Image (cartoon, rainbow, N blue to C red):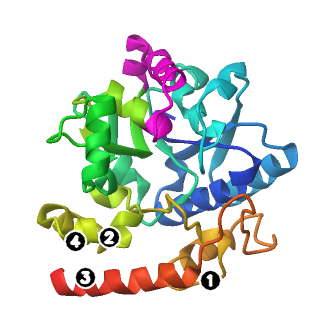
Amino acid sequence: MSDSINIVFASDNNYAQHTSVAMTSILRTTPDISRVRFFLISDNISLEIKEKICQTVKKMGSEVFFIDMHDARLNEYFISGQISRTAYCRLDMAHLLPQSIKKVIYLDCDLLIKDDIAKLWDMDMEGFPIAAVADLGIMASARSRKQKHNQLGVAYNEDYFNSGVMIFDLEQWREAGYAERVKSLAREHNYVHHDQDALNFLFKGNWKHIPLRWNVIPPIYNLFVKIIINRKYRNMAIAARQDIAIMHYAGGYKPWEYDVNYGFNDYYYSCLEYTEFKDVKMPQMDKRRKHRSILRQMVRLKIADFWQWLFG
């Protein structure tokens, strides 16, 4: 289908359920579901889990294609914190997907879509090989700015992007060999922000800006102080928060780790009900991660609501 909206996720068994929920959020908000097709790069997802994802997507009127990742070099990449080796699978999209596919949207698994994904797909790439959303959390931090300047050469007046939502011109990626170049960078350096740093290094000054509402991360929906005190970033963040297209749960608070809390993770649970994972035991706290009180997060949201009322 030449008019297909090609959407790529990369997951292992641990994030498969959440990938299914993210897919469901897309299908619930896209009027023309017939255009949507998913590609899931699988890092050892079990057959049973694959079948659940297939059933979820099929009953909603779409399709999903699995691409099994067999790269012995995945273990050579630097991982830390919440980042697993699966995060690096996306770097090979240009070679893993059929040559006939010239453009894709890549999405992280820990996000939810609240607007028609066709609006994102139909954005003009303006000849750039990659499109992404500026990461205000890093840009508003003097310490992070200095780090990105010293380690990546990102100028203080340049933007740095978040890699959780990206559009790729795969034709350019194949022609320029971008995959091998960014993979080499990721293997050779223990970047603080992993392949996101590698992507920012490679595409300095060569990426298309997507509006902030398409990747609303915690510093935006929580309206952190470092955002509020910067008038430019504050105005951008409040506008995005008032009209969220993609809610991205990057960072420490994941929606599936807590019971339903309105305004934070109720939409996750709503989408979960449409999936074949709806009967799993919830919430699911990852024992490998430090438990964080949901009360702290809900207080943050209340404070953010106040800032939005004051400055909105």
Relative vertical location of residue 202 with respect to residue 88 in this rendering, above or below:
above
Tell me, yes or no, if residue 40 can be seen here: no
- Element type at mark 2: loop
Which callout, 1 or 2, points to the residue nearer the camera?
2
Residue at 57% from the left image edge and 80% from the top image edge: 294
Residue labelled with disc 2: 224
| Residue under pointer 4 | 228
Instruction: Find out whether the residues at labels 1 and 2 contact each other: C-beta distance under 8 Å.
Output: no
In this rendered view, identify the residue nearer to me: 133 or 1: 133
Dot 3: element? helix
Give the prevailing secondary structure in the magenta stretch: helix
Q: Residue at x 55, y 60 (%)?
A: 27
Disc 2 residue type (three-letter): Phe
Label 1: how many Cα within 10 Å (few below 14, some 14–19, many 20+)? some
Q: Which residues are magenta?
A: 170-196
Q: What amino acid type is highlighted by mark number 1? A: Val
Which mark is on residue 131? none
Q: Earlier in the sequence, mark 1 or mark 3?
A: 1
**In-front residue for pair 188/38:** 188
Residue 196 vs residue 276, the one in the foreground: 196
Residue 51 in the image: x percent, y percent? 81, 49
Q: Secondary structure at mark 1?
A: loop
Is residue 226 depicted above or below 308 in this figure?
above
Q: What residue is disc 1 on?
A: 260
